[in-house]
Amino acid sequence: MSDTKPLRVIFLADTRPGHYHIAQGVIAALARLRPVEVTRIEVKRKWIVPTRWLRARINADTFYPPRMLRMAYRIDADTLPEADLVVSAGGETHMPNICVTRLLDVPNIFCGSLLRGLEPDNFSLIISSYERDEGSDRHLVVLKPSSIDPDELGRPKTVPRYGPENLPKTLGLLIGGQAGGFRYRDSEWAALLAFVAAVSKAWGTRWLISTSRRTPDSVADRIDEMARDESVVQKFIDFRTAGPGTLPQIFAKSDAIVCTEDSSSMISEAVSARLPVIGVSPRAARFTEDEQLYRDFMMGKGWSRTIPIADLTPERFAEVLSTIEPLQENPLDALAQKLKARLPQLF
């Protein structure tokens, strides 16, 4: 550690876990280099203030950060603590990040894609997971940061390859639900659960299964019934009673992960935990442009693959699993070193 004095971080968080978890991953990487002292500020924009007006004010000569913070976000500039760095993720945090940074005259990190009309030079560093940003002196293209530490989970340092010659003994299944361009038919949920049973019967593999807030009650009820057979389901974590934050329990004990394709964050976090990951998709599946680029990024690195639910069989699954080469490094350590190289003034 190059500095024992705490790095004072203002963390601007919106209400979306998929965003603020990424920012928390950046902060966890910073903490590998020196202690951090974090002030979290919730960002809730007044929706009567249009984005086009905010963007115009940011670029105006008369821009006055305290006024925008107060008018658009109900943040009193006088209450902001002294800080060394501002960190945020997600589109709703663009403007307050710039405001606080200019007000305090400190470096800032933004995670995600920039709004049209916002120039990269508004930020000291932009954490991106899209290869289109390679080569930009303001962007750092990496796997979406996660605060999950594979070493703390007890994940192996050298991750084995699985496939027909080395079948996994324990598989994790992360189940989402309807979201964006993803729609699951009842027949597809039935086919996914039939695949779970078929793998257990063919390989003697047991499953660790977790649902999410989007999972239909009818699907969770079917899994609850399946879980009565311990030769198939080793553990079932029902989101309805367990709530969020349970994925590390699955990651710690699984050899590989199966995840419904509607959740980039679940797939990305499993990759960060140094696990081979296979996404499974319904027939009605459509990504946004950014999400497709991110999936292509992870598959291009060899960390994940995808199989339509309609094509799932134990044999097909084992074949595709054999093509995955999981992440071997600790992504928190790797990100920490990249942050140190890009923002040396902080360390």
Image (spheres, helix red, strand yellow):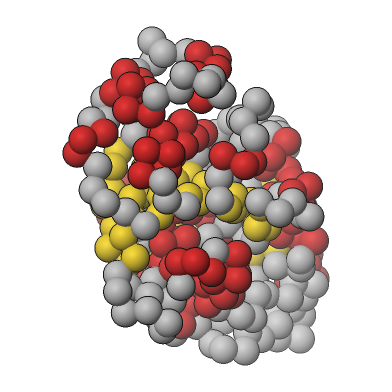
Q: Is residue 134 above or below residue 6?
A: above
Along the viewing direction, whichever of 86 and 298 lies nearer the viewer: 86
Residue 122 visible in rendering: yes
Q: Position of residue 63 (x, y in %)?
A: 45, 22
Which residue is painted at 58% across and 57% down in the image?
A: 144
Which residue is painted at 57% across and 75% down in the image?
A: 337
Along the viewing direction, whichever of 68 and 287 lies nearer the viewer: 68
The single residue placed furthest to the left in the displayed view is 79
Quadrant into which the N terminus falls: bottom left
Left or right: residue 75 compared with residue 283:
left
Number of numbered discs visible in the structure rendering: 0
Which residue is painted at 65% across and 35% down in the image?
A: 119
Q: Position of residue 42 (x, y in %)?
A: 30, 38
Along the viewing direction, whichever of 112 and 63 lies nearer the viewer: 63
Which residue is painted at 71% across and 82% down in the image?
A: 161
Residue 208 visible in rendering: no
Left or right: residue 182 compared with residue 210:
right
The single residue placed furthest to the front in the displayed view is 61
Q: Is residue 268 above or below residue 252?
A: above
Q: Position of residue 147 (x, y in %)?
A: 43, 65
Residue 5: name its quadrant: bottom left
The single residue placed furthest to the top in the displayed view is 48
Q: Position of residue 43 (x, y in %)?
A: 34, 34
Q: Is residue 121 above or below residue 314?
A: above
Along the viewing direction, whichever of 346 and 162 lies nearer the viewer: 346
